[in-house]
Amino acid sequence: MVDPIPGLGKTRAMARAIWSGSLSFGLVNVPVGLYPATQDKTIHFNQFEEGTSDRIRYKKVNERTGREVAQSKIVKGVNVADNEYVMINDEELTAADPERSRTISILDFVDASDIDPLHYRSGYYLAPQGEGARRAYALLREAMAGEAKVAIASLVMRNKEYLVTVRPDGPDSVLILQTMFFSDEVRSPAEELPNLPGEERFSDRELAIARQLIDAMTSPWDAEQYRDTHRQRVQELVASKHEGHEIVLEAPAPAPKVVDLMAALEASVKAAGGGAASKTAARTSKTAKKATATRPAKPPAATSASKPSEAQRRTARKKAS
């Protein structure tokens, strides 16, 4: 396997807060900074004219004349009807900006289980800003963890208002902020999706087999065991071509045949059972290796030097006789 090119698909490490202000909890204000909690490792490609190393660039052109338009001459417009637009310049748009604020204002506390994960957008770390903020930050985090609640708050960042949650993270002594979709931004599946199941009925056997499959595939959550295999293959492909190797295309796998639902469930349970056994064996082996590594070594066996020699045994017998 070819080693991927170092840094391919990676972004630079987070350096500083993307927003700073305070977290407001009643009359308590805790100075905090907002840091990205995730990073995009998607491999980004540039575009070139085939057979050359000439980059392809995009220009903003007038749709009717085909002429390039300077950025200073471009205004925003909203489509209100067919081919009818309302033009708005930046100064007019500023009037609708949310009130500038450097405060994350906690509005309510709710049970985390009451929030549909579909409402979550992006995750960030909230960190105390300055030595004086650490105690108040730790106190708020500890109190929230004890109540098993998440805070609902509002945040204004980059001229946009966000609904957010703030919650304590268990393993690390940090508060997590997650931006959210407003309720009218989440689509209704009943209105948007065709062919949703209705009054389907299932036999006890079908449900039992389906639950058995779930049980066979159930394992503890471990984020480290999941990898972006497509990104890894692209990295290996780029590294291989970079070293001058020829790329051999493989035939796509045949599409799976449509089979009976019960037959598919039973075959899946059988396959999952073998996979579960392999996982258990792997975990057992891993545990055994750890135990072997940590078990104290046995004391060395007595050497021949510590045993009486044959001459010593003969002398002892003569004395005895």
Image (tube, rainbow, N blue to C red):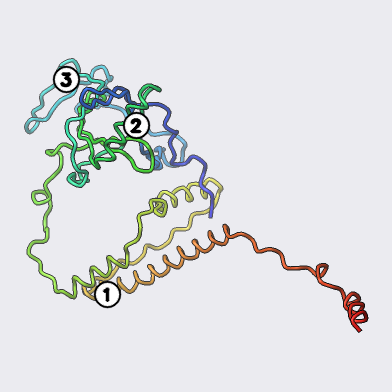
State the image quarter where residue 292 is shown.
Answer: bottom right
User: Tag on residue 177?
Assistant: none
* The one of 316 and 38 positioned closer to us in this rendering: 316
Residue that numbered label 2 is attached to: 138
Residue displayed at 68% across by 63% down = 299
Residue 113 percent across, percent down from the top left = 20, 47
C-alpha span from label 1 to label 3: 60 Å
Label 1 SS: helix
Compare marks 3 and 2 and give the one earlier in the sequence.
Answer: 3
Determine whether 42 is above or below 16 in the image.
Answer: below
Residue displayed at 89% across by 77% down = 316
C-alpha span from label 2 to label 1: 51 Å
User: Tag on residue 93?
Assistant: 3
> Is residue 62 among the parts visible in the rendering?
no
Determine whether 26 is above or below 238 in the image.
Answer: above
Residue type at the position of mark 2: Ala
C-alpha span from label 3 to label 2: 40 Å
Q: How many marks?
A: 3
User: Tag on residue 266?
Assistant: 1
> Is residue 256 among the parts visible in the rendering?
yes
Q: Is residue 46 toward the left or the right of residue 202 in the image? A: right
Q: Which residue lies furthest to the front in this view?
A: 320
Q: Mark 1 or mark 3, which is nearer to you?
A: 1
* The one of 127 and 303 positioned closer to us in this rendering: 303
Q: Mark 3 or mark 2, which is nearer to you?
A: 2
State the image quarter where residue 91 is shown.
Answer: top left
Label 2 SS: helix
Residue type at the position of mark 1: Glu
Label 3 SS: helix
Q: Is residue 53 toward the left or the right of residue 191 in the image? A: right
Q: How crowded is mark 1: few (under 14 residues within 10 Å), some or many (20 or more)?
A: some
